[in-house]
Image (cartoon, helix red, strand yellow):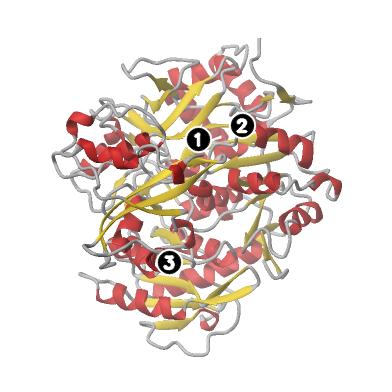
Amino acid sequence: MATQNILWTPSSNETNLSRFLGHLETKVAKSFSDYVSFHKFSVDEFELFWKEWLSYSGLKLHKEPQKTIERGVHFANSEWFPGALYNFAENLLEVGDPESFALVFYSEDGKVQKLKYSELKQEVLKLQKHLFGLGVRKGDRVVGLVPNAPISTIGMLATTSLGAIWSSASPDFGVRGILDRFEQINPKVLISVESYLFKGKQIPIVDKLEEVSIQLAKSTNSEFKQTLVYDFVEPIKNFGKIQNPFRYNEISPPKPSDQLSYASISFSDPVYIMFSSGTTGLPKCIVQGGGVLLNHTKELSLHCNVSKHDRFFYYTTCGWMMWNWSQSVLALGATLYQFDGNPFHPTWESLWSMAEKESIKVFGTSAKYLSVLEEENINVKSKYPLPDLKVILSTGSPLPNSGFRYVYQNIKKDVQLSSISGGTDLNGCFALGNPNLPVFEGEIQCKGLGMDVQVFDDMGKSVSNQKGELVCPTPFPSMPLFFWNDESGTKYKSAYFETYDNIWCHGDFASITPENGLVIYGRSDATLNPGGVRIGTADIYSVVSTIPEVKDSVIIGQDYKDDVRVILFVVTADGVLLDESLIKKIKDRIKLETSPRHVPSLVLSVPEIPYTVNGKKVEIAVKQTVAGLEVKNKNALANPNSLDFFKDRKELQV
């Protein structure tokens, strides 16, 4: 018997998932009685499953693989589809009908830009030739400081068409946040806008671009060739001190005889570098390859039911993995809708009016966005009936039960609400939606096909109906290839495999429900997740450490009103009082040098910060103390009594 309310039931099983299931039943001469049995097959016979999806999905190959996977002694050393050759960009550009729209971009100021697949290919060809002329080749890095607009997609496709590696950040990042990412990977070209729009204001970034390009150009072993400036809001008048500048609109157009070329790469060659911040040090540089595309198409086609000509939208920035994920709808021949700016400017109607006008089928956003609509008691359906909307996707943080109810009461009754969960690390999902299954209040519908998702208790035993660590004991195609500048693989293995031997531990608390869905409770590590945007404490520490009035600090995320708020505790220098002036200084510096998302909700004073005997700051112990939980590893602390300063503080009552 279901323990939760059923909010939606599918009216038809005529879905991409049903068709693929039928294909596999014929192929392997087996019958799958339900999704649970199908999922079990997909992980028990995961090599066969992924081999069949590679073929069924129509992924274009230049050379067939010798086998599905070469298992390494360690999970992290497994190689997918050895011997196969393909091109990432080719698979996104050569599926859609030439005269159908590939990209439709809505700017915050109401301007609309549309590109057909044929037009997108011409733009990619133009940039490809320019990058090739700069010497960009297989394995080189091209980075984008770009909004979620066509230039981001064009930049990525031109880069990957050459077999080079794409990485991006959002223009609202501060200089330090950008350099902490891009300096590590030594890019050959930086593609950037001159400004962006937010809440009706034009925000120039030329000063920021000057400093970033100067530092990239003088980095150790720099291969930096050019800062390519795209006029996003208005033409740039003065390049100032921008290093090696070139105006994007002055790139020579391709000749009629020019054709796109697609460099052959293997599934073990890098395509994306993603950045995921931990609790100490610089952001991790997570390198991902062709398995990402294979997993994306599985998720988008089978779990989201996206098909050719469908209209897909996800509200994201280029600093979030959902940007990379959404790009892959092009590999299905669908239309990708993009938006950049504040989704509540000038009113809450911005995104929904677009969804109504454009007949969006899949609408993706963050749980935080839905929570704000709920808090404001916005009744979307009273103004926008959204007859073509079939799926609402939510991720970034767990969607509370009230958020589920809000969607069905105030947005649309007949819609599949897919709360999805995964991460930057795998550039995809462990748990997500299912067009053939009902939606239960507060639950993610199912485990992802081919993903051996389990929940372990404290003893490392797989459990159901019990909160534990989300793990994956079996390799999957979108697992990172490696971390940049981690030749020994030590950082990679320590990031996911320290908790359980040779088993991926994701760092999320979760439980498997009686309905075989999942509930995600949030991070089990110290990474912050305010408003659904995952950020690392190291980004904040790097700023706070430069403020002379602050001697030491510790940062945690506190569960607060169905979200997470960032709390910064500081030890002030001798004789310094933490007053409103100093708090403002700290917040302003963090906002300027990282991003507005990093700014703490509260800055509080403590006399001492807890450390381990090895000198490591213990954020998790502080978080547990603030939450009123028992800290089990006090014997590992050099100063365990310091935790008393974080206990029962009135400012932290929820």
Please indicate whether residue 615 sits to the left or right of residue 451 in the image: left
Quadrant housing residue 114: bottom right
- Outermost residue, top side: 1
Query: In x, y percent, where is residue 304?
Result: 64, 37
Write the residue at 24% across / 41% down: 642
Residue 441 is at least partly visible in this image: yes
Residue 254 is at least partly visible in this image: no
Of residues 258 and 556, the one drawn nearer to the viewer in this rendering = 556
The crowding category of the residue bearing disc 3, from other C-alpha atoms within 10 Å (few below 14, some 14 to 19, many at least 20), is few
In what element is the residue under mark 2? loop
For residue 433, which numbered disc appears in the image? 2
| Residue behind mark 1 | 54
The crowding category of the residue bearing disc 1, from other C-alpha atoms within 10 Å (few below 14, some 14 to 19, many at least 20), is many
In what element is the residue under mark 3? helix
Query: In x, y percent, where is residue 587?
Result: 42, 63
Q: CA distance from mark 2 to mark 3?
A: 43 Å
Please indicate whether residue 467 sits to the left or right of residue 544 in the image: right
Of residues 384 and 279, the one drawn nearer to the viewer in this rendering = 279
Q: CA distance from mark 3 to mark 1?
A: 53 Å
| Comparing labels 2 and 3, the label whose residue is closer to the camera | 3
Which amino acid type is shown beneath numbered disc 1? Leu
Relative vertical location of residue 538 with respect to residue 25 in this rendering, above or below: below
Of residues 358 and 523, the one drawn nearer to the viewer in this rendering = 523
For residue 584, which numbered disc appears in the image? 3
